[in-house]
Image: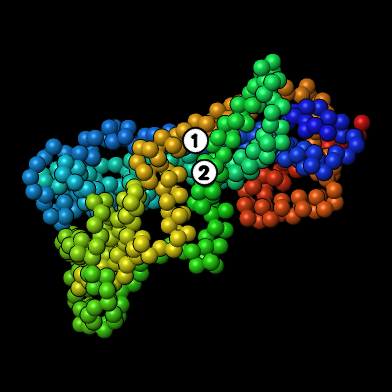
Amino acid sequence: MSTQTLDSPAASARPRAAGGSALLALITRLHFYVGLFVGPFILVAAVTGTLFVLTPQLESVIYADQLRTTSTGTARPLADQVEAAQRRIGPGPRLFAVRPAPGPGQTTRVMFTQPGMGDSESRALFVDPVTLEIKGDMTVYGTSGTLPFRTKLDYLHRNLMLGAVGRNYSELAASWLWFATVGGMVLWFARRGRDKAAAARSPRLRARRWHGLLGLWVGIGLVFFSATGLTWSNWAGGRVDQLRAQLGWITPSVSLKLPGAGGMAMAPGGEHAHHHGGQHDPAAMALAANNVPAGFDRVLQTARAGGIDSSQLEIRPPRADGQAWLVREVDRSWPTQVDTIAVDPASYAITSRADFDTFPLIAKLIRWGVDMHMGILFGWPNQLLMAALGIALTAMIVLGYRMWWLRRPAPGAPGQTLTQAWRDLSWPGRTMAVGVALALGWCLAVLGVSLAVFLAVDIVRWMAANRH
């Protein structure tokens, strides 16, 4: 029995298909539902993601006045730069972090938090390191320090600018993308060679052939998009975090809690060295807390001596008594530099560190995967590769809708249903299909809920067809 097309009419009362054909019919119908109903969400994710990875250079042009300076000479101490930003911003906003100028001709970011800002957002003042002139004042986002133009693209890609509720859209797209890709490959191999000759005479088959070929060429990349997108999703990402915790694949992090008097601290070289009893007395701690700007230069010196050598780093002062400074590298190009240390505010000794070289392999792969997904791991080659995948995915979705439009069923006409395709399976096949659906629904909650909606609509259609 030949595999039916996605939209071909099929009477509900027909002989049961052979096992292989029944399974293909089930995959075909589910592939169609995903394309028809989830396709718009995947399309939005593909377009906004492509725009995001292609625009770092554009952002550097748009905000050139804030990011760069023509001043020459010796840079002033970080303390002076922080104080210049504090004078400009006035009382109220809390000093959050400083990102020293990565090189000559670039500005320092002094970052503040204040009420009304979203998660991972901060208000950054861009300071000329030489003249202390404030070159800009704007909201930045995330570890990558995204500026307003690309932040809007990021929000569109992540949540359609609808906040926490909107995150379900991107998780829906990521949850089904891998299935649509793998299912499409199965269908392509099942009918390979049959469409080539007919495609010259049929626009629909020609669209289907190109749809399938594109999916075959970029299939691995699309599965990569799906997997990496799910790692930072809301519901599925939580499952991933639980699995990583159980398997010991957690990304190491530093402890900001200071050791007690007489406790062992980390020396600048990264090795356990001297006891620091007497250096954690209340007077010393109060002095450190009240002189935060001056501490930035000492902390930076400690970080450089302790092996933090990236030109792109972020320094965060203690947020409360008994906490350490945090210094982290934020350069996610290759080779990845994301080492982090904690520094005692009284003794300026390293008390904790997490070096990328010591990360478990899975933690490294996840870090690289997320950075590649964002187009920042290998610079412009990574950008072009991710953009090519996004454009191919966009073309596939457009071709899929063209296929449906060219042979859409007449209103009220009976059509093949997912329910009937499932009933055509053998009992072991039905049981296995239910088991796989339940397992996927548990692992990928948004996929499970949307699958339940598909089934509810499909069962109604199947029951209506069987009344005749």
> From the viewer's perspective, is 75 left or right of 304?
left
- The answer to whether one can see residue 274 in this image is yes
Q: Position of residue 106 (x, y in %)?
A: 19, 43
Instruction: Report which quarter residue 302 is drawn in.
Output: bottom left
Residue picked out by circle 1: 389
236 w.r.t. 342: above or below: above
At x 54%, y 52%, the residue is 234
> Which quarter of the rendering shows the C terminus?
top right
> Which quarter of the rendering shows the N terminus?
top right
- The answer to whether one can see residue 93 in this image is no
Amino acid type shown at disc 1:
Leu
Q: Position of residue 426 (x, y in %)?
A: 85, 48
Q: CA distance from mark 2 to mark 1?
A: 9 Å
Q: Position of residue 330 (x, y in %)?
A: 32, 52
Image coloring type: rainbow
Amino acid type shown at disc 2:
Phe
As drawn, the residue found furthest toward the top would be 201
How many C-alpha atoms fall within 10 Å of the one at disc 2: few (<14), some, or many (≥20)?
Answer: many
At x 16%, y 44%, the residue is 104
Residue picked out by circle 2: 225
> From the viewer's perspective, is 62 left or right of 158?
left
Mark with earlier residue (2, 1): 2
Please tell me whether mark 1 sits on a helix, a strand or a loop. Answer: helix
> From the viewer's perspective, is 458 left or right of 339?
right
Please tell me whether mark 2 sits on a helix, a strand or a loop. Answer: helix
Instruction: Report which quarter residue 36 is drawn in.
Output: top right
At x 52%, y 31%, the residue is 392
Does the residue at mark 2 contact the one at mark 1 (Cβ under 8 Å)?
yes
> From the viewer's perspective, is 245 left or right of 18?
left
